[in-house]
Image: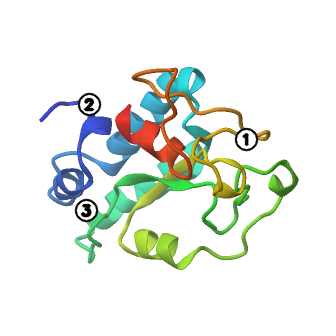
């Protein structure tokens, strides 16, 4: 495996965090650094939650040291689509009028990820209302396919696809 933790798959990363081979903080920071390096060029992420994610990573590392019960994705950084509620953050769905629509609770699927120990590091771009076959909207702009700028990375999960590819 490579030392670039942002390249690791979730299961290997969770296992390494659980076993103390790497820390959740290292994994989260690796992903945040990668996002900083590529986001301006490709626009897969609409926002990042660096401070919150690093605090959550520190708590995850403390849980490992404290030999607490750990979920299957304990300490693993993930992104959440801009159309799925994440409590305390805006669920923009790529729509300008929704930029201040703060979710009071998380979507059940997001809750499952968080209960499994995943750490949300940011939001991925979507087309407006997630209704198009390309990821472009007036609020966050276009997500660019890193392999061919003339082709779309896809619609509803275009931001997620590019985030995973990079």
Q: x, y (%) of residue 66?
A: 27, 69
Task: Count how many numbered circles sit on residues in the image.
Answer: 3
Say which residue label 2 marks: 4
Q: x, y (%) of residue 88?
A: 70, 65
Tell me the CA gap for discs 1 and 3: 43 Å
Of 137 and 77, nearer the camera is 137
Residues tagged 1 and 2 counted as in contact (Cβ below 8 A)? no
Say which residue label 1 marks: 137
Tell me the CA gap for discs 2 and 3: 23 Å
Residues tagged 1 and 3 counted as in contact (Cβ below 8 A)? no
Tell me the CA gap for discs 1 and 2: 31 Å
Say which residue label 3 marks: 65
Q: x, y (%) of residue 64?
A: 26, 63
Q: Is residue 117 left or right of residue 20?
A: right
Among numbered discs 1 and 3, the one appearing first in the sequence? 3
Residue at point 71% right, 57% down? 129
């Amino acid at each position: 495996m490579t030392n670039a933790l942002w390249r690791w798959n979730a299961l290997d990363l969770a296992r390494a965090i659980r076993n103390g081979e790497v820390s959740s903080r290292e994994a989260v920071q690796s992903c945040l650094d990668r996002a900083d390096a590529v986001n301006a060029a490709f626009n897969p992420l609409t926002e990042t939650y660096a401070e919150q994610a690093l605090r959550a990573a520190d708590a995850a590392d403390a849980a490992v040291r404290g030999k607490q019960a750990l979920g299957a994705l304990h300490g693993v950084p993930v992104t959440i689509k801009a159309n799925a509620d994440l409590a305390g953050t805006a669920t923009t769905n790529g729509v300008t009028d929704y930029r201040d629509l703060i979710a009071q609770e998380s979507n059940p699927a997001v809750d499952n990820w968080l209960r499994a120990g995943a750490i949300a590091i940011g939001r991925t771009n979507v087309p407006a209302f997630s209704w198009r076959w390309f990821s472009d909207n007036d609020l966050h702009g276009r997500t660019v396919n890193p392999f061919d700028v003339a082709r779309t990375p896809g619609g509803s999960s275009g931001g997620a696809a590019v985030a995973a590819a990079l």
